Structures are given as C-alpha cells and as structure tokens.
Amino acid sequence: MRKIICLSIVILLLCISCDMSMLHEHSFSTEWTSDKNYHWHEATCGHDEVSAKAEHTWDSGKVTVMPSETEAGKYTYTCTVCGRTNDVVPKTVRFVTNCDTEIEDIIVGSGEFIDRPQTPSYEGHQFAGWYSDPTFKYKYGFNAAVKSNLTLYAKWLVDADCPLTWAGIRVSNYGMRSFGKNNFPNEERMAGFAEKMSGWYEGSTGAYILIVGTVSGDRCSLTFPISGEYENIRGSKYDQYESYLDAFDEAGYSVWLQVEPGYADLETLAQLVLDRYGHHSCVKGFGIDVEWHKPIEGADEGTKLSDADAKKVLDKVRSYNPEYTVFVKHWMQSHLPSNMEGFIYVNDSQQFESMDHVLSEFTDWALYYAPQPVMFQIGYAADKWIWETYENPAKEFGEAIIKECHSGNDVGIIWVDFTLSQVIDRD
C-alpha cells in the first residue's frame, strides 16, 4: 500500500512539473549558434529549447584569397542570416581564344555555374564555340557545374560559303498523300522531283530521303518483305520502292534510306535495309529519325542517340560500303551524337516565329556541326506563312537560307513531301 502511495506522489509531482514547464516562457539569445548545416538561437533560461532553427542561406560567394602557383586560394560563402562562413578551394576557368582577343579567367566555387563569356572576334573567321579540349572534340555548353579547374578553347572556322551539295525531297508513304489518296507519284514523276530541285540549285546533286521504315507503337514497319522474326520489326507483303530506286540509279541521284526505329535494334534495321537495297548505286547511306528512337510517351522527341550507339550503326553501314554515311535527324542538338566524321546532321525544325528565326536556326546548326555536312528539311505546313511569300518557295526559300551559311560545310536542302504538291510545279 505504501508503495502505491509513493508512486502516486511521484506521478503527481511530475504532472505539476509539466504544468509549470508549459507555463514557462522561454528566453533565447539574440546571437546565432551554428554548425556547418544549420543556425539557431539557444535558450538562455536553462532549457534545451532552440528558436528559429533553419538551414544556412549562402550568398553567391567571393574570392578571399587569390589562387596562385603556390597558393590554392580561398573562395568564401557567407550565410546571409547568421553570418557563418564556409571556405572552399576555388576553381579557375581559363579561356584560350586562339586569336588576339583576351578573356579574363573566371574564379568560382566548386559546383557553381558560369555564364558564357562575350564572343571573341577574329577577322575572316566564324566562331564555332567553346570546347573543353584543344582538339575540339567536346563542345562545352555552359550548363554543367564547374567542379574542377577548367580550360576552354575557342574553335574558329575560316569564313567561307557553304556549298549546296544536295537538293531534293523527303519521301514517305504517308507524306506523299499530299498528291491525293490514290495518286502516289509513279517512278518517272518521282524522279522528276529531284531533277527540278537540283535544277533550281546550280551545282547540286538530286537527293532523296527515302523513308523505308515507319514507327508503329514500339515497332518499325518496313516497306519491304523480310524473312525471319525480329523483335519490334515487321516487314510488308510487297516491296514499295525497288522500282523507284532503279529509276534513281539511272538518273544518278543520291539516296539515304531512313527509318523511324521505335524500339527496334538500329544495327539490325541497318542490316535489313542494306541487305535489301544496298545493291543500288544511288544509295549513299542509312538514316535515323531520332524523334522516333525509343519514343517516350508524351514527350514527342525520342531518346538521345549516344555516340557509342551511333558509331555501331556507322560501322555496320560501312561494312557494306566504306563510302556510306549515316544521317541523324532531329531539331535539337542535345538528342544527336556529337560531331563525328561519317555522319550527316539533319535539322527538321518547324513552327518558326519569323524568317530571321529560320535563318538563325539553320546557320547556327551548320556552324555547330562544321566541318561535317548538314541538311535542312524544310517546307512544313506550319511555316507556310513564311515560305509562301516567295514566288518559287522550293527554290528561293532554300536559297535565302544557304546565303546566310558561312561555316564552309556541305549543305543539303530537302523539301518535305507533306507540301511538295503545292510547290514542285512552280517555276
């Protein structure tokens, strides 16, 4: 009984203590206490309570000790709330301009981003961007945090007009419906389209981007029969383009055989396509529309084609003919492999805001991929309000673009089949 009474007294005292604590108003220091992550005000009333505890809010930092050959230097961040400082070893970004213009080093804290410096000038040359290596293999996009000392090298191209090497059209079994549902152009008429295009662009070779594989869900549906079973690849009952390629052979045109791959294996597609059509003299290579490479639902832009995968495709294609090339097509450079020999970089941008926007897009594209060849796939209905202002759009719209390109690489103008019937018969 006595134990029960004692326990009751203890509980009562604890309750009284809790009630007194709840009635107590804590007082806190006006000074900040901090560790490397947080700051707070400590209680001055003897309790363990803290007030206003929060993570530090760091400023943009500044160099407090300049780096040198003998000194690593110091970059100091200060919390804008409590004043605590955090010292780190700074990183230096140096610019090798390869011309008479000099750009001062930029010193930042590790993990910081830097802005693109003002473009240097070099008379008679086109600035082709900043690269992180002196051989200009890796272009620097200023979208990555600086985590180590960095030297950037300016690439220059001699200011030279771009030769218009190819002029032709895109051909697909769905785009050619612009000529009428049951009026797919025959071989003679189809060959005449490249004849007209190359005639409008002096010195060019008639060219075709011939789509022999279209995306259907995850699969690539080829326009010719295949034997055997392949994952995500389906053949057709009849061959749609054999007789057309015969006509292109005879005319001496250049043809790239394009697929919309879906989730099909790219090397397998290249093999099937070139096994079927590689005997044609007009065939100059293989093409990949990266918009339809492993498409992501709702994104409408496909999955980036890596350098490694692109090189595997090129190796496969060149096992048929060492002179073959592979074109990769998209409207965003971020989705295409880097600038490499053996590739043609095709831009199929549309929905432009103005003619100036058109010129800026395509000239920047040519400059970005120089010295590799590029093609511009133009004539989309979304841009009709721009190209329709020309009397002969398939000629004059393309000429206006070429006129502004001075990066020296070979260029092709390809008019899309969606609107071809509206422009091809103009002179």
Image: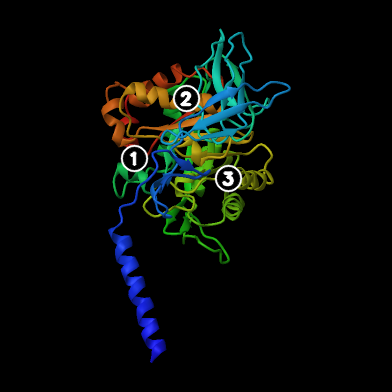
The amino acid sitting under disc 1 is Phe
In this view, the residue in front, 37 or 268, is: 37
Label 3 crowd (10 A; few <14 / some 14-19 / many >=20): few
Residue 376 location, quadrant: top left
Residue occupying image coordinates x 37% and y 25%? 358
Tell me the CA gap for discs 2 and 3.
22 Å
Decide if residue 232 is on the left or right side of residue 361.
right
On the image, the x and y values in percent for residue 58 come to 46, 35
On the image, the x and y values in percent for residue 9 come to 35, 79
* Pointer 1 or 3: first along the chain: 3
Residue occupying image coordinates x 61% and y 27%? 74
* Pointer 2 or 1: first along the chain: 2
Tell me the CA gap for discs 2 and 1.
25 Å
Residue 283 location, quadrant: top right
> Which is closer to the viewer, label 1 or label 3?
3
Q: Is residue 165 visible?
A: no
> Which is closer to the viewer, label 2 or label 1?
2
Image mark for residue 364: 2
Identity of the residue furthest to the front in this view:
2
Q: Is residue 72 visible?
A: yes
Decide if residue 393 is on the left or right side of residue 251.
left
* Pointer 2 or 3: first along the chain: 3
**SS for tag 3?**
loop
The amino acid sitting under disc 3 is Ser
The residue beneath circle 1 is 418
Tell me the CA gap for discs 1 and 3.
30 Å
Label 2 crowd (10 A; few <14 / some 14-19 / many >=20): some
* Whether label 2 touches label 3, CB < 8 Å: no
Image mark for residue 306: 3
